[in-house]
């Protein structure tokens, strides 16, 4: 079954890349991409419903099945997270997802809920592109929809990262419409309804533009204060984050460093390196972003999307505990920013397709006994190490590209494409 998943992800990624390149710049490109997205979305609803109704055992290894669903059942039974059981999610995660579970007590209800949120997010994005007369919307959505991150991790595994992306999309669209307070509320929801990773979007949301930044910031600050205040009532809301400092997975810079220089893991600075390196790289980018958002000669939505995409990529590069499917928290914004012009577009999409193609392979290698603990002692471990080099290299390439094209570029960054 695992090898089948690897093969299917590879086929979907390669086929999507081939179709994208074949249609690029053709008169019928938009029609083909539109038809593919609509049919693909309907297909995801159908196969997800069938699998969870008839063969739910096919998704028993997902986090939604193993962790979230049992805890939601406990929440419905009267237990509270971070008081009666340890939990990494935010305070509104279980109240929200308890609603579909009450209707259908199955992991399928959760997966279909997230699939609905993904579909609504895509609709809002496409409507925004139509209203702004941006030509790249269907390209972005096609690449997003026909990726394993959507086909497998949302439509089958129900990864909750899509909840963050949904609220960030709503927030940036509201900010573009000048609705600062509601934009801040949506940004707060990205954190309150999912987990702390939603905070990664806050710099792009709060400082979308200089005007009314305080109205976008107030709901963000209040959501954090509300969460921290639960400590006074016996809810240990910060306990899950104490564990993160000692964890290490593949798919990031520190995995490579730890295997090349094992002694560094014993240093006192080892726990602080992820946060320090993340902030050191992000801060100059953020400062330039602030200056750029004061001007009116560019598309603020794209620039803010790029900042959020860069923030997500830096998180993937510098966090010691990160899985490649975490890219879902900002995937559509990464694609939007990568495909905003046609210069070297096929090259950018090729690197994206590679990440998609090896996404499940990396998971397979990491969870295979011996590969993670003795990276250089087996062919599989060596392949995992090589995949990490390529993956981190691509993340860095995207980060540099987005900084150069959107943040440090003094010209217009409207998303209208030139065939």
Image (cartoon, rainbow, N blue to C red):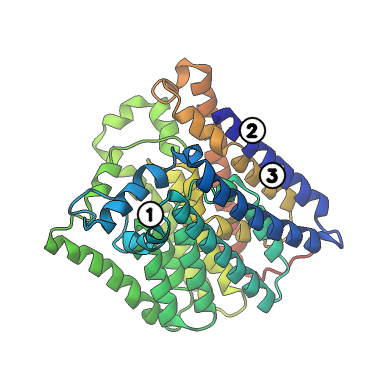
Residue with the mark numbered 2: 7
Which badge, 3 or 1, comes first in the chain's sequence?
A: 1
Residue 196 left/right relative to 334: left
Q: Residue at x 50, y 78 (%)?
A: 174
| Image marks 2 and 3: residues in contact by CB distance under 8 Å | no
The mark lying in front, picked from 2 and 3, is: 2
Q: Nearer the viewer, residue 271 or 150?
A: 150
Where's residue 49, x and y in %?
55, 51
Q: What is the spatial separation of the Cα atoms under label 2 and label 3, in whole angstroms?
A: 18 Å
Tell me how many marks there are: 3
Which badge, 2 or 3, comes first in the chain's sequence?
A: 2
Q: Nearer the viewer, residue 57 or 226?
A: 57
User: How packed is label 1: few (under 14 Cα within 10 Å), some, or many (20 or more)?
Assistant: some
Q: What is the spatial separation of the Cα atoms under label 3 and label 1, in whole angstroms?
A: 29 Å
Residue with the mark numbered 1: 279
Where's residue 27, x and y in %?
87, 63
Where's residue 414, x and y in %?
67, 71
| Image marks 3 and 1: residues in contact by CB distance under 8 Å | no
Residue with the mark numbered 3: 350
């Amino acid at each position: 079954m695992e090898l089948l998943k690897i093969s299917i992800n590879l086929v979907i990624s390669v086929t999507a890349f081939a179709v994208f390149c074949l249609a690029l710049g053709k008169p019928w490109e938009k029609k083909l991409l539109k038809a593919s997205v609509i049919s693909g979305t309907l297909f995801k609803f159908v196969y997800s419903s069938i699998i969870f109704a008839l063969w739910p055992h096919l998704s028993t290894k997902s986090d939604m099945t193993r962790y979230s669903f049992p805890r939601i059942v406990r929440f419905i039974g009267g237990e509270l997270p971070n008081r009666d059981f340890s939990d990494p999610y935010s305070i509104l995660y279980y109240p929200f997802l308890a609603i579909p579970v009450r209707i259908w007590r199955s992991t399928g209800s959760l997966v279909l809920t997230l699939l609905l949120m993904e579909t609504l997010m895509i609709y809002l994005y496409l409507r925004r592109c139509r209203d702004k007369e941006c030509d790249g919307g269907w390209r972005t959505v096609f690449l997003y929809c026909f990726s394993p991150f959507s086909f497998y991790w949302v439509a089958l595994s129900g990864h909750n990262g899509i909840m963050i992306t949904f609220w960030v999309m709503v927030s940036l669209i509201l900010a573009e419409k000048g609705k600062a307070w509601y934009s801040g509320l949506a940004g707060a929801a990205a954190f309150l309804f999912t987990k702390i990773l939603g905070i990664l979007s806050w710099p792009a949301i709060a400082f979308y533009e200089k005007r009314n930044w305080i109205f976008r910031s107030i709901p963000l600050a209040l959501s954090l204060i509300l969460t921290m205040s639960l400590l006074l009532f016996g809810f240990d809301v910060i306990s899950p984050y104490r564990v993160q400092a000692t964890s290490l997975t593949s798919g990031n810079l520190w995995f490579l460093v730890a295997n090349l220089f094992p002694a560094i893991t014993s240093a006192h600075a080892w726990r602080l390196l992820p946060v320090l390196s993340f902030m050191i790289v992000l801060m100059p980018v953020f400062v330039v972003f602030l200056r750029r958002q004061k001007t009116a000669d560019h598309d603020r939505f794209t620039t803010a999307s790029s900042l959020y995409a860069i923030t997500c990529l830096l998180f993937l590069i510098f966090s010691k505990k990160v899985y490649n499917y975490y890219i879902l928290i900002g995937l559509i914004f990464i694609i939007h920013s990568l495909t905003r012009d046609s210069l070297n577009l096929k090259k950018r999409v090729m690197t994206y397709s590679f990440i998609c193609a090896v996404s499940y392979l990396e998971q397979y290698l990491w969870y295979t006994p011996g590969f993670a603990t003795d990276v250089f002692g087996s062919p599989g471990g060596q392949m995992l190490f090589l995949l990490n080099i390529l993956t981190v290299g691509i993340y860095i390439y995207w980060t540099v590209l987005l900084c150069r094209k959107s943040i440090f570029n003094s010209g217009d960054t409207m998303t209208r494409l030139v065939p």
